[in-house]
Amino acid sequence: MTTPEPQSPSPQPSEPVSKDRVHRSPAGIAGGVLLLALALWLGIDALVTGEGSTRWKALAMLVFLVPLIAAYTVRPAVFANEDRLRVRNPFRVIVLPWGQVAAFRSSYSNEVLVPSGDKYQLWSVPVSLRGRKKAARQEDRRAAGGGRRGGLLSGMETSQFGPGGRGATATDGADRPVRAQGDRIMDELRDLQEARKDAAASQGEVTVRWAYEIVVPVVVGAVALAVLLGVG
């Protein structure tokens, strides 16, 4: 009589990793694409039609300008999930577990602060004074309109059934102030940090990595361009 072989335990499913919420600047990306297209057009034209050292200068200019433009416009982004904040700035990538984030600050730029006192700018979440003024005007108009609607809403039910049978509140979102896009993103990051700062998965050290894929071409292009201009 043979005994059955023991069955190996089935592998336990790993905990799902939350997806990153990506915050970028649409205006910065649009401007960067236009600048890159212009630089490539002028540079390639100089490479094709130029003579002598002009071609070498055009090549050095492209090596210098293309990564520099991309670094300040297309590259910046903020990635946030339940465990950490990753900030991709023009020349550095900073990874901050939520337990290492002390506060967020908004003045002339949006910044994240760590307990050691260091601060890192969020390049992809710019402060827009124009956006804040627009949001303030919308909030004023909504407040004025809400006062006129108050008498009508007092005689209506606060809960109604909308399309599909779901209950909808007549005053949904009425208590939320209108905020500029950058301020809404900062509020979201603050809420996430407050909720996850004490979690075990949100602990660790702050890491900073230089973006050598950007730094090296910029330095090489700048040096080559300076030498070519120096020798004429």
Image: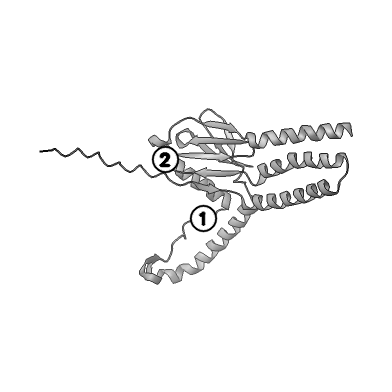
Quadrant position of the C terminus in the picture: top right
Residue type pointed to by label 1: Pro
Q: Secondary structure at mark 1?
A: loop
Q: Position of residue 225 (x, y in %)?
A: 80, 35
Q: Secondary structure at mark 2?
A: helix
Residue most extreme to the top: 116
Q: Name the residue at 79% across, 33% down.
A: 224
Which residue is identified by label 2?
A: 196
Q: Name the residue at 25% across, 39% down.
A: 9
Q: Name the residue at 48% across, 69% down.
A: 149
Q: Residues within 10 Å of mark 2 (few under 14, many from 20)?
A: some
Give the number of the mark in front: 2 or 1: 2
Q: Position of residue 207 (x, y in %)?
A: 53, 31
For the residue pair 61 and 79, the one nearer the viewer reads as 61
Q: Is residue 201 left or right of residue 23?
A: left
For the residue pair 36 and 84, the one nearer the viewer reads as 36
Residue type pointed to by label 2: Arg
Q: Residues within 10 Å of mark 1 (few under 14, many from 20)?
A: some
Q: Earlier in the sequence, mark 2 or mark 1?
A: 1
What distance separates the C-alpha of mark 2 from that of mark 1? 24 Å
Position of 177 relative to 219 (above/below): below
Which residue is identified by label 1?
A: 177
